[in-house]
Image (cartoon, grey):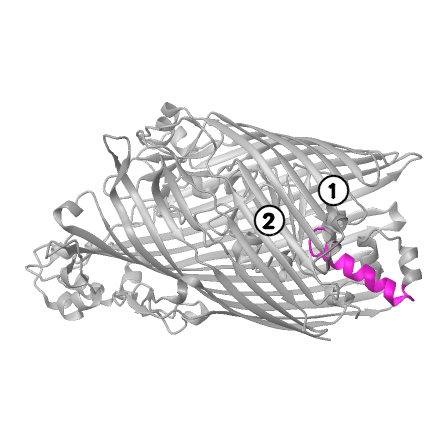
Amino acid sequence: MKNTSNRFGVSALALAVLANISPVTAFAEEADSAAIEEVVVKASRLKGTASAVIEERKNQAFVADILGAEQIARTGDSDAASALRRVTGLTLVDGKFIYIRGLGERYSSTLLNGATVPSPDPTRSVIPLDLFPSSIIESLSVQKSYSPSMPGHFGGGNVDIRLKTIPSDFVFNVGGNIGGNTNNFDDGYTYNGGDNDWRGMDDGTREAPKSLTTLWDNYNPLSGVSQEQNRQIASELNRDYDPILESVNPDFGLDMTIGDRFDEDKFRWGYLAAVSYDNQWQVTEEYQGQDFRQNTDGTWSLVRGFDQVQTNEHNVRWSGMFNFGLEYDRDHRIDYSLIVLRDTADEYEYKLGNTNNVLLSDGLRIQDNEVSYEEREMIANQFKGVHNFPEFWNIGLDWKYSDARSSRYAPGGVSTRYILADANEDNVFDVSESSLRKATTSTRYSFQDLNDKVENYGYNLSIPFMFDNSELELKTGADFITKTRDSFGRRIDVNTLAFNDIDLSGSRLNDILTDDVILNHPLKSNEAIIRDTSIDGDDYYSAQKIDAYYIEADWFINNVWRISGGLRWEDYRQVVAPLKPSTGEFDLPANPTEEQLSNFAFQEDDVYSSLALTYIQSEEVQYRLSYGETTIRPDIREVAPSTFLDPLTGYPIRGTASVKTTDVKHYDARWEWYLGTGENLSVGLFYKDMINPIESVQSPGQDGPPLIVIANADDGEVYGVEVEFMKDFNFIGDFWGMNGQDFFLSGNVTLSDSEININTQRVVEQTGVSAAITNPVRRMTGHSEYVVNLNLGYDHPNGNHSVTMAYNVFGERIIIPGIEGQDDKYEQPFHSLDLIYTYYPTYSSTVKFKVKNLMDEEKTIEFSDTLFRSETKGIGFDVSFKWDFE
């Protein structure tokens, strides 16, 4: 049997430590290759699950879960978001955002290498985690109990994405993958995009014409131009968005990593560079309900919505990373990191349905063709240093500086509506009987541009004290964050009512509204073909500034007791300045009062505390207790008056300037048992008490989706139990020619509940909209009563094959709170079952085969046993190859 230790990038000594063998024994056994190989094979299995990072979790002063690179590779997850759903108590929403312990993404925070970074998504306060490909991730840390060195904005927990750093030896590998989805076997809808779509960059095809942007730049209203000028600008808008039904290309990707390390006397330096490219397509069949009517028998019928929807989304992702590190005498190290992440989503939706005014009973249907195109990008420059001063009482100093910016450029939002008639009264609606909707808004164009910038710097200073029977470490530090955002948004509507006696028959916009029609067809007097329907607040500037200082103590007593805790003071300032698109002036009420002005600026300072106690019963068993007090502040998007569409529901969401901060008290307890073989078991309890929790409420809509507004509930709580384990099957011995020690089962289970109390009158006063809330006492939005993760793994004794079955399911969770007698809308459990097979044909090569969603589950949202939304996911498959050059 050949030695495979280098395949996993760890030494025999490290593997021995993972298998709980003493270093002395490991060195003694290096001469005995057979003994070492036995350790390697056993430890590789454990490292592929939880053992690689179990020691870090064990040594944490506060409750935390760690997910290592090998664990991520084992389950075949392609990005940070997919990987984190394997962590105890975490659920994935919309494929991008993580809910920790049932609390929405607004109750969590995300750090990149310990630093705050901006989000390019205007619909969420945290960065979308699907931006981070797993190939550049070293580990993911989820801290669930609060410590003073963490930001005071802490609810469910904090996620720290740690990217790969300088390698220990030369590394150079290239890889590629090809795959697809069963949903993609049939044709999908697309349209004529730009020549650079394969790069994820618009070549100008979708952007607003120069004549229009000139008006915006000079704050000249579109309503002020002449009818002929309006015609000319309308003709310059791209109208070639008509659907094309064609075969779907396969998914493919490429990635490369190169790095090295050099030693000279007391100096060590090295670099690591990685780049990846991913091109994916996903066709889905959907059902999109909006408004329902209750029947006399208590059931519900669809009144407004789309019962036939086909979506085709094209994603192009680029990522690049460069790290350089310099170390001196093992006591001083400085690192520089450049991270570039880019994700472009191009989606076409072909939808058939009805509205409150276009009824199936009248033999009419609507057809909506919708294009959504957005480019998201994040660029971060980070410097950090770690210094130890043995000559000065072993004082430790670490510092960081991060300058990051993100952007979301969305020039390609286009929605066109057609009316279909059942000409033969046979319930067959053919496109040959369709016509462009005659209305002031037959087609809507949207153009959006958002830019965020975050500067974050800080330091931590520590000094240890040694006593006869105890060790004490004192820490202090500071953290400074400055965040700015500018948001731009415009909406341009095509008004077909402006034309005199025009034939709008057809199903292709570019064939109906030709250049000749737009430029020459007679118009009604004083009517314009295109109108600017942007509203005040679509543009805004905003800024946040946080100054924080903390003190913390960590005290070991007799190697049995550990007491950790401290205080953190934060000064928080935020301002939001909504603008009038027509003038660029601040959108303020006439003669604003001091109270009205205070809604746009917010300042608070407070002290946040934590205390943690650990009892170390033995090398294998320890107990934890912790308490913390933190806050959740509304994000810029939650207080800005602008409206944006929630990608999960398609509903418009508007911020509320008067939203208050949430005060949170955290209680945690956990028992942990670590066995020498790498097996482990832990059981934890948690309780969170909240005052003024931030929630979403619904306001009734007219002939479209309802408006979602941000508001405060009076109080809330969430509590539960978490169980995590890993166990091999050595106890069953040999069976079917295989040995039980080559199999393992790892997983976690979370059982929890939550409750919030909403005062309807307070919501109306706070938001200014009506809200006949069906359930003012209910679970929190996004909370699941259970989450289960299971991984069943097998490693062949020769080390050349490994197989993992990964299962994940979450309990139903509220996505849209109900109003006017309708129950809350619940996303139903999704049973995700994935198969990952890895084969090592040679010493330097790896082949991996993945099948995702083996059970072909659909994503569904229901209320009162009525389907509200559904989306097929299909069965995904992927084959990848990686070659290591050494």
Residue 319: % across, % down? 55, 64
Quadrant for the C terminus in the image: bottom right
Residue drawn where x is 63% and y is 51% of the image = 791
Pointer 2 or 1: first along the chain: 1
Image-quadrant location for residue 548: top right
Query: In the rendered image, is residue 269 in sight?
Result: yes
Single out the residue that lies furthest toward the left: 501
The magenta stretch spans which residues? Answer: 30-50
Against 191, residue 649 (above or below) is: above
Left or right for 598, reference 172: left
SS of the residue at dot 2?
A: loop
Q: Is residue 41 magenta?
A: yes
The kind of secondary structure the magenta stretch mainly shows is helix
Residue 129 visible to an observer of this rendering: no
Identify the residue under disc 2.
86
Label 1 secondary element: loop
Residue 651 in picture, x, y percent from top left: 35, 44
